[in-house]
Amino acid sequence: MPPYEVHGLDTDADPIVASANRSGVSWGAIFAGATGAASLSLILLLLGTGLGMSSISPWTNQGASATAIGIATILWLTFTQIAASGMGGYLAGRLRTKWDGVHTDEVYFRDTAHGFLAWAVATLLTVALLGSVVSSIVGAGAQAGATVVGGAATAVTAAGAGAAGAAGSRAESDAGPGGMNYFIDSLFRRDPNGAAPATTTAPDGTAAPGATNAEVSRIFLNSIRTGALPPDDAKYVASVIAQRTGLSQADAEKRVNDTYAKAQATLKEAQAKAKEAADAARKASAYGALWLVISMLIGAFVASFAATYGGRRRDL
């Protein structure tokens, strides 16, 4: 049987019939364009990462601002999509098989489809290589939302962790102004102009100041979780402070109430800052995802157009 014989027709003498029976998709050209686009995308992303790192500085008032870095990232991602997709689409259109006897509109559609398929394959290859970047964007948004919902619980837990260590072996970070231990220690400060303490033992007879500090920490943490310091607990803590510092019971109770109010105000401020940071992270994640989608759509359009141009150059 002669080659290209279809329904008794010798297609050696009819190239239009032979072309019509060939596949309208040149996968070799598509994969070639996709490989080129994915490689160029990787190079440009690495270059953009290096340029971004060089513009960041840990020193105050040095380096680019967060807004400038965000705008530069958006512009670079868009440029990466345009350059890589344009090259991949052009290669797919220029290298595809020439179709003889196919209508001009059909050739235009096939070229556009080749560019789009090359962009799609290149996108899948890039995601496979850089999947951690996409997962980090999605994960940041989900984590930010969870932090907004549980901001109060997170702040209280952090405060509890600061006071969980054994008294006498607290780390320097726990003694900072933001930790609960700072407020507990301030309760037991002696008044330089006051009377000397009558005894160094606690009301129950124990002579371990560290144990009383830990007990007062637990009382404060429990009251912060419930929202108020019970009067009995306030009176007990004041009696411990009075014996340890030499203050009168009234002055000790005043110190307890004032210190407890300061601790509550600090925790509320920490909660507000945590919510603000979480909301900022959520917005940044949302904007990043939206701009990534826009840049990818631009890349799809550029790849389709470049494939059409490459196909026209191929058919000249």
Image (cartoon, helix red, strand yellow):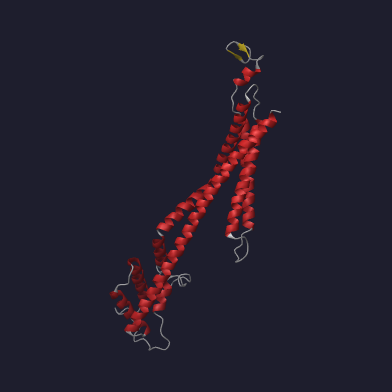
Residue at 49% x, 56% y: name it. 281
Which one is nearer the viewer's eye here, 142 or 288? 288
Residue at 63% x, 26% y: name it. 104
Direction from residue 224 to residue 301 in the image, left or right? right
The answer to whether residue 86 of the structure is visible from this angle is yes
In the displayed structure, would residue 249 be above or below residue 260? below
Direction from residue 66 to residue 95 in the image, left or right? right
Number of numbered discs overlaid on the protein picture: 0
Picture quadrant of residue 197: bottom left
The single residue placed furthest to the right in the displayed view is 316
Residue at 35% x, 70% y: name it. 218
The single residue placed furthest to the front in the displayed view is 105
Which x, y percent locates residue 18? Answer: 62, 18
In the displayed structure, would residue 209 be above or below residue 150? below
The single residue placed furthest to the left in the displayed view is 232
Which one is nearer the viewer's eye here, 142 or 212? 142
Q: Which quarter of the rendering shows the C terminus?
A: top right
Q: Which quarter of the rendering shows the N terminus?
A: top right
Picture quadrant of residue 71: bottom right
Which x, y percent locates residue 312? Answer: 68, 31
Which one is nearer the viewer's eye here, 293 or 181? 293
Which one is nearer the viewer's eye here, 181 or 254? 254
